[in-house]
Image (cartoon, rainbow, N blue to C red):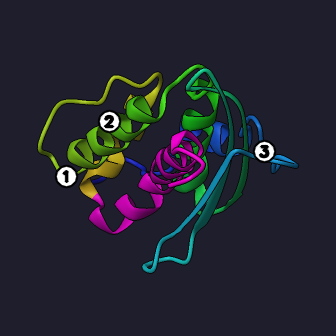
Amino acid sequence: MSAPLYTTDILRLAASIPHHQRLAAPDGTAERRSPVCGSRVTVDVMLTDGRVTEVGLLVRACALGQASSALLAAAVPGRTAGELAAASDALAAWLAGERDAPDWPGVEVLERARDYPARHASIRLAFEAAAAAAAQAAAPADA
């Protein structure tokens, strides 16, 4: 564990989160918080024909949570609620060492963080919130 956890790539991502503004009238919203470090991520989504067309984030997290949020936000448009749930599950399993890296652009930048289980919750926040927001948006109005 002599290699640095906070690499230049992670710090660049943390400083450049796309869609870093809440939506005015989202179809779905979810917030997730890490009880370990207090990091918090809120994700708003708009869906059209079952796919994310707009996303907004409010990120109050450590550099790893911010970097993960940046990765999520960059590739979330066009995804379905099911795809986001699968990505969230795959990220959690990868962090736990139970599978290969998830099929999400850029996620390999978080590889070193797999050795730091206390950081996993913060890394998962944006993906979990996006999956929950999209599920809420996709749910029938009368449910």
On the image, the x and y values in percent for residue 16 come to 74, 37
Q: Name which residue lies at 81% across and 50% down.
A: 22
- The location of residue 121, given as percent across then percent down, is 39, 63
User: In terms of secondary structure, where does tag 3 sit?
Assistant: loop
**Residue 86, numbered circle:** 2
* Disc 3 target residue: 20
Q: Residue at x 74, y 34 (%)?
A: 18
First in sequence: mark 1 vs mark 2: 2
The magenta segment: 116-143
Question: Looking at the image, which is closer to me, 137 or 100?
Answer: 137
Looking at the rendered structure, the secondary structure element under dot 2 is: helix
Q: Magenta-highlighted stretch: main secondary structure?
A: helix
Point out the frontmost of discs 3 and 2.
2
Count of all numbered marks drawn on residues in the image = 3
Residue ID for mark 1: 96
Contact flag, marks 1 and 3 (Cβ < 8 Å): no
Label 1: element kind: loop
Q: Amino acid at mark 1?
A: Ala
Left-right relation of 72 to 87: right
Q: Amino acid at mark 2?
A: Ala
Q: Amino acid at mark 3?
A: His
Q: Position of residue 119 (x, y in %)?
A: 39, 63
Q: Residue furthest front?
A: 142
